[in-house]
Amino acid sequence: MCKCNKNECCCCEPIPKPIPPSIPDLKTVALLELSGTSIDGNLKLTFEYYFNNNKEQFKSFPIVDTEGKIERTIHYLNLYYGLGYRIFIGFNRSSILLAVKPWFDLHPKAIGISPSSTSPTLNIPKNIYRISPSDDNILSNIRLSDYFISRRKIFYVYSKGELSTETVLALLLNPLSPVKDKIVPIGILPDSSNINDVQTTYLANNYNPLLDATTLYLFVGSQRNNFINLFTPVFIPLPTFDISLSSFPTFTGAQQLIWNNLYFSYQNINLSTSPLWRIGYETLKNLYSVRGLNTLQLNNFLKTRKSLEELSNYAFVQQFNENKDTEYFSYSGFNYKDNDWKPASVFVKDPIFGTFYEALS
């Protein structure tokens, strides 16, 4: 009974506290290279797979084709920023990310996510999160130098004019590099119009599959497929180490035998993956972007303003340093053998156990 001696008294009921207005989620748009360089097709397919199959977890967002052009990328950044968008996914070529960094500096409320940019040139403060580890980590940790020291020549076949590939070339030619005197660079133009330079350079250097090797860093358009298709039972390939972290190439017909046990692909496939990640990987197979699901998860945390210290992930540990570059990672090396990809090695950098490398039988 209330102080008014009434069984029911509205004047003595506690006054309900007003419910504070909810803060809307930040809006996201993906600015991808779907034509021109065409490097982001698998990322788009992976996003759409989870949009369609896990609608409650991952809400869809607009996906726009920048054609790989800086001016179109800047145009869409300005357009969607004006429409209230604040999270921008893309910039997977380091050349593009470097070009848009000044825009992000001028728009501090904007947040970038780059699933695949890897150039160590961008290991600098920025408001753009990079999901993939940088190339200097790749070169220093996958133990290729141990193998290359025993080789006579190392042909470095790379996408000419790209920040990431040119930076790797500089690292290989660095005066402190143990293989600097073995490197023979072959830069391939975006349209692959000079792809025959590979054969010309190999032959001019009297290439020998028993003595030499190739480091491959091709990822623009059809460059990698054009490289693979150069080789025949007469012009046989060298042992080739693909460090682009791109999806596995597909070998068909005679190429299956020509490349058997000669193509090694390094993937940002982690030791620990969730069922959700593996189902997507098994469904899309070679069209799956191994960084797509982690990108969507990071976007969920950023758009709802959750602390990244609570960030859980679907593939290994996702933690960022002061430059918003990924801090921990793992690589897996695969050998193409008997028309299948066989795990050959694994490298891990873990916050508790440190680093370790294991060559697999």
Image (cartoon, grey):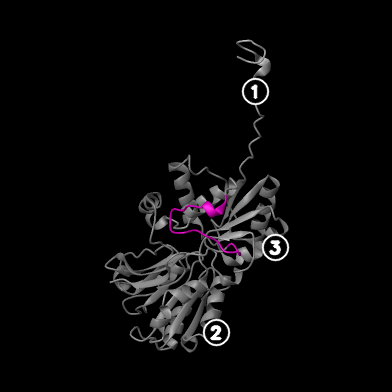
Residue identifier under label 3: 102
Q: Residues within 10 Å of mark 2 (few under 14, many from 20)?
A: few
Earlier-in-chain disc, 2 versus 1: 1
Residue 268's place in the image compared with 227, above or below, is: above
Q: Nearer the viewer, mark 3 or mark 1?
A: 1
Residue 96's place in the image compared with 261, above or below, is: above
Amino acid type at circle 2 is: Asn
Measured Cα–Cα span from mark 2 to mark 1: 74 Å
SS assignment at label 3: helix
Left or right for 163, reference 15: left
- Is residue 248 covered in magenta? no
Disc assigned to residue 174 = 2
Q: Which residues are magenta?
A: 307-324
Earlier-in-chain disc, 3 versus 1: 1
Residue at the extreme right: 106
Disc assigned to residue 142 = none
Disc assigned to residue 14 = 1
Foreground residue among 278 and 125: 125
Asked whether the beta carbons under mark 3 and mark 2 sit within 8 Å of each other, the answer is no
Amino acid type at circle 3 is: Pro
SS assignment at label 2: loop
